[in-house]
Image: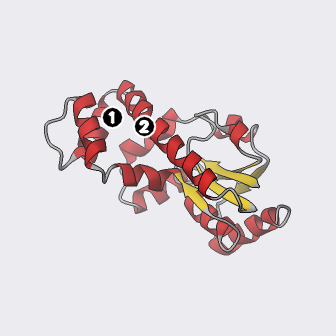
Amino acid sequence: MIKIGITGSLASGKTTASKILSKNRGPLFSADIEVKELYKRKSFKSLLKKKFGLENNRQIKKSIRRLVLKNKRNLKKLEKIIHPLVRLKMRKFISKNKNKKILFFEIPLLIESKLMKYFNVLIFIKAKEKLRLRRFMLKKGDKKLFKFLNNQQIIDKHKIKFCDHVVVNDKNLYILKKKLLHIISDYE
C-alpha cells in the first residue's frame, strides 16, 4: 500500500488537488472533512463548551473563531483537542482500506504536526499568498482570519524540504490536473 499525503498552505488548492489525484485511484481521507464532522457531534460541542467556558452551543464555531483570533494560545488548545481525534479517524481509515493499492490523505497541517513518517509520498501544493487570500475570501473567509491562520503555519520554503513533489497551483484547473496526473503516473 502506498500512502500519499497532500499538503500545502491555506487556500493553496489541496482539496481540488486531492480530488484529482484520488479519482478512480483510491480512497481519500480529508482532515478538513473530519473536523467538519466533529463539529456536528453534540459530544464534541459539549467538550469545546466545557474547555473554553462557552455558554451558547448554537454558534460554537463562531465563538471558537473569536477566541482564537483574540489569543493564539486558544488555537493550540483547540488543536490539542482536535488533532488526536482526527488521527484516530485516520488510523481507522487506513485499517478499513488496508487492501487498497493507494490511499490519499489531504492534511493541511501535515508538516506542522510532524506526520511525515506516516506517508510514502508527500505532495506539496503551492500558490502565492495574494492568490490564496483571494481564494479564501471567495469561500466567505475574512482577511483577518486568513492572516492569522497563515501566520501560524510554517513557511512554504521549509515545508517543501520534506516533500517529494511540489505542484505550483497558480494557473487554471487544466494545468493543475496535467501536473498532478504526471506525478501520480509514477505510483499507479
Q: Answer whether residue 98 is visible to the viewer in this image.
A: yes
- Image position of 86 (left or right of 181): left
Callout 2: SS: helix
* Mark 1, residue position: 69
Please report contact status of discs 2 and 1: CB closer than 8 Å, yes or no. Answer: yes
Badge 1 amino acid: Leu
Q: In the shown orientation, is residue 80 left or right of residue 117?
A: left
Q: Determine the residue positioned at 78% across, 64% down.
A: 184
For label 2, the crowd category at 10 Å Cα-Cα, with few meaning under 14, some 14 to 19 and many 20 or more, is few
Crowding at mark 1 (Cα within 10 Å: few <14, some 14-19, many 20+): some
Residue 91 shows which numbered tag? Answer: none
Element type where label 1 sits in the image: helix
Figure quadrant of residue 17: bottom right
- At x 64%, y 59%, the residue is 97
Depth order, front residue of 166/50:
50
Residue 13 visible in image: no
Q: What percent of the width, then of the height, locates residue 105?
A: 62, 53
Mark 2, residue position: 148
Q: Callout 2, which amino acid?
A: Phe
